[in-house]
Image (cartoon, rainbow, N blue to C red):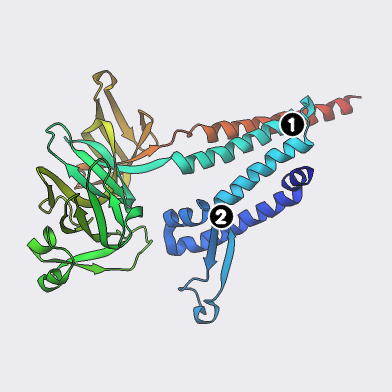
Amino acid sequence: MGTIFNFFSSLKLTVWLLAFSMALIFFGTLDQVHYGIWHTQKLYFESFLVVWQYPVQAPAYDVLGWIRIPMPGGYLLGGLLLVNLLAAHITRFKFSWKKSGIFLVHFGLILLLISELLTDIVARESQMAVDEGGRNNYSQTLREYELVLIDRTNPDYDQVHSIPAELLKSGKVIDVPETDLKVRVVRYHPNADITRDEERARQSPADSGASQRMGIAVVPKAVTYDEKTVVTPAGFFEVISAESSLGTWLTSTIIDDRFPPQMVTAGEQEYEIALRDKRFYHPFEVELIDFKHDKYPGTEIPFNYSSEVMVHHNDSTKNQKALIYMNHPLRYEGLTFYQASFANDDKTSIFQVVRNPGWLLPYISVLLMGLGMCVQFGMHFFKFLGKRSH
């Protein structure tokens, strides 16, 4: 046991972990050019192990394309750094007032590591678009998708049965949550276009819905990580009841509200089937009263974006009016609404919606580390002044 504690508390381990962290940041920065920030973060910093490959776009790829460099990911390095710091305190440090500043610095660092892990696990970002004079009660992601069956029989609300896109593997049979139905993934494309081609549509697996009614076919595309390029997954899905197959539908994120809904009939029950950006529904509606897009006089340079909103909660005592503009978000029900963008000739405001229960922890950790440094350096400073006075 003593040997294990000595290993995890050693300064050599600290140095190696910091060196690997620098390497991870370096190679992650190189790949950010090709994968974008979102995918690079998932690949390098929200993983336990990553393998860097010599980029196809780099010079001399024909000669150096064989290079593969495995390295620990962000979760592994962050976890080991946390264990290393805790083990060092247990084995070597004894609390005293002379070392109180060091303890505050270390405690702040521990809190910072924990807050980063908490953010990765529970934080959620999405966007909400609201038309001027309209309302919206959901936000949606830009890089996560879901297959949904929607029961619209209730006049007051829709019952949404969702399957995350991560489960959509060709050939897999998936239970539809809270129903007796199953979905068989006939074919799934992470990125694809749709086109009008009646001949190809007749040869496709789909025997129901838009594909057969409108002659729509799928054209698979390579997956792209360019953040300026819209990814549009598509797939063929067979819906199965306890008795038999109900049909196979082509769905795509391109087949949206502009198309007639694709309906699945299961006995006396009807569901709309769709593939779309993942949505998060909220117990309130955001009404956009007025959106302003101010510019510097005589130029097209933006001076200010602002949205006057009214939040209508299911509990009317929680209704709130607010003005959202740059660097002045609305914090409501554990969510933070930032003014992100606009569309539709300044008639639609787009909010970045962030849910991060641990948003205060980084501020507290930085405050503790700053206080610890002030205490530690202050002790040495006053000790130095005391020696000079003698």
Q: Residue at x 18, y 66 (%)?
A: 205
Residue 282, above or below 183: above
* Tally of numbered discs: 2
- Is residue 124 toward the left or the right of residue 65 in the image? left
Amino acid carrying label 2: it is Gly
Query: Along the line of sight, which residue is nearer the eye, 307 or 12?
Result: 12
Amino acid carrying label 1: it is Gln
Q: Nearer the viewer, mark 1 or mark 2?
A: 2
Q: Position of residue 292 (x, y in %)?
A: 25, 38
Kindly identify which residue carries mark 2.
Answer: 73
Q: Position of residue 208 (x, y in %)?
A: 12, 59
Kindly identify which residue carries mark 1.
Answer: 376
Q: Position of residue 280 (x, y in %)?
A: 30, 40
Residue found farthest to the bottom? 63
- Is residue 327 toward the left or the right of residue 349 in the image? right
Residue found farthest to the right? 390
- Quarter of image, res 314: top left
| Disc number placed over residue 172 in the picture, else none | none
Q: Position of residue 48 (x, y in %)?
A: 55, 53
Q: Is residue 201 visible?
A: yes
Residue 53, above or below 85: below
